[in-house]
Amino acid sequence: MDDALVQLFQSVVTEMVAAGDPWLSGANLRVEPHLRAVYQAYLNHGPLMRAVADAEMGQLKATSQHYREMMAMWDEAVAHRLSASYPWVDKPAMVSHALNAAGERIMYYDFGSGPTQVTDEDFGATVQIMYSMWCSALGIEQGSEKQIVKG
Amino acid sequence: MKVLLALERLLESHPIEQITSGRLAREAGISRSTFYRQYASVDDVLVQLFDHVIAEMTIASDGWISVANLDLEPQLRGLHQVYLTHGPLLRAVADAEVGELKATSEAYTSMMAMWDEAVTVRITESYPWVKRPALVAHALNAADERLMYYDYGKGPDSISEELFKDTFQVMYRMWCSAPGNQPGSEELVIWRCHVDYYWSRTPPAVNAYPRNDRGAAVSTTRCFPVHFLPSIRQLGRRPGSALSVGCHRNGCSG
């Protein structure tokens, strides 16, 4: 069971990485489509992702280990992108960790029951809230995503 | 109380699933029969211990929640400090959501829902310009919950003061930016830009920058923040009236 879950999870991680790759790799620095694509991948596999997150507290040790590794990898990838493309962000590792923790939990709560349980409107609203959090944390303007220059 | 304290002590070194009623009774220095006269199960003890911590968390943040004091920083710090102090216990409670401890799981779900509701009310009443306050409250609480779970779950000895401060600051900035507040002043920030804008009952969102004649967002490079409400008072304008803040298409003069 544990092994099967790990393999399923690996395929979803691949999907999420593909969805997030343009932004993570710096090829396309638009945050909004990046978030939308990653969240859509999570939503498509909501119940599976919820089971994987829950494994952290259960007996599925291999799944739990993979989940922790995936979260650490995501934190690192986002922190790297922040450092490279948003150099004005203070403590990028911490900001990355906080944004990912927020995203992880809200997806767990809101998308964990799967795509048939979430309306397009609710999905859009959740993405929008997280997008505004990302923009605030990155010091960029929503929409244009240009740096907000104070002074 | 001896049993509650014993459980919190045990949680510092053991995951909740390894703590049985027998072990807990031994740690508390009482017999199993005495334990069962006071509590139905480990689940029952955990719920009671959690109730104490909820009370502590409520006290830490009550000023902001009840609007007696909208200064968010010390209260959010207080809340984080309570979580850190009881990290292993709160992690066990959060983990109960997917385990066998049904009463604890229910208490945790209720607490999160109550917290979402309380923050929603505060945002709705004190920051009426925030769209979808319930979703914003939910997102902020989810962020806090997960971050605290990861970073404070091992207890106060596992995190340096500096790391605690950094973690807290990141969340504080998030809490400020969600309703468009300036960290430190806790007041709404509006960016004074190159064009006049109008004060209506719903002030523009922080990032809703004015557009130029061609509909493109105006560059923000010459913008600067003002604390909106004092400025309104200072200018003697009333909601709904046109407000010029001294910024024009050719640049800011204010």
Image (tube, coloured by chain):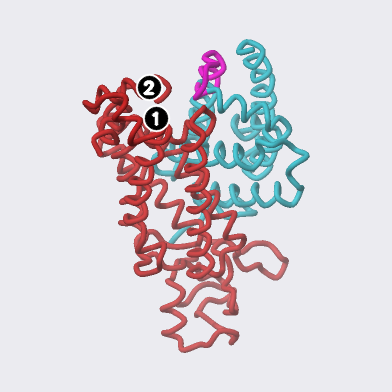
Chain colours: A cyan, B red
User: Is residue B208 found left or right of B39 in the rendered image?
Assistant: right
**Distance from the alpha carbon under mark 1 to that under mark 2:** 7 Å
Front residue of this view, candidates B158 and B181: B158
Residue A120, image x and y in percent?
76, 48
Is residue B30 placed above or below B58 in the rendered structure? above
Majority secondary structure in the magenta region: helix
Q: Quadrant of the N terminus of chain B?
A: top left
Disc 2 target residue: B20
Kind of element beneath mark 2: loop
Confirm whether circles 1 and 2 share one chain. yes
Q: How many marks?
A: 2
Task: Please name the residue shown 34% across and 61% down the image.
Answer: B184
Q: Quadrant of residue B160?
A: top left
Task: Please name the residue shown 56% across and 28% down the image.
Answer: A53
Which of the numbered marks, if any, corresponds to residue B42? 1
Q: Residue furthest top?
A: A3
Mark 1 in CB contact with mark 2 (< 8 angstroms):
yes
Q: Residue type at mark 1? A: Val
Q: Residue furthest left?
A: B29
User: Is residue A85 found left or right of B167 in the rendered image?
Assistant: right
Q: Earlier in the sequence, mark 1 or mark 2?
A: 2
Q: Is residue B205 visible in the rendered structure shown here? A: yes
Mark 2, residues whose alpha carbon is within 10 Å: few (<14), some, or many (≥20)? few
Mark 1, residues whose alpha carbon is within 10 Å: few (<14), some, or many (≥20)? many
User: Is residue A132 found left or right of B181 in the rendered image?
Assistant: right
Residue A43, image x and y in percent?
70, 36
Indicate the chain on which mark 2 is placed.
Answer: B
> Residue A78 magenta-drawn?
no
Task: Please name the residue shown 31% across and 26% down the image.
Answer: B33
What is the span of residues highlighted in magenta in the rendered image?
A56-68
Q: Residue type at mark 2? A: Thr
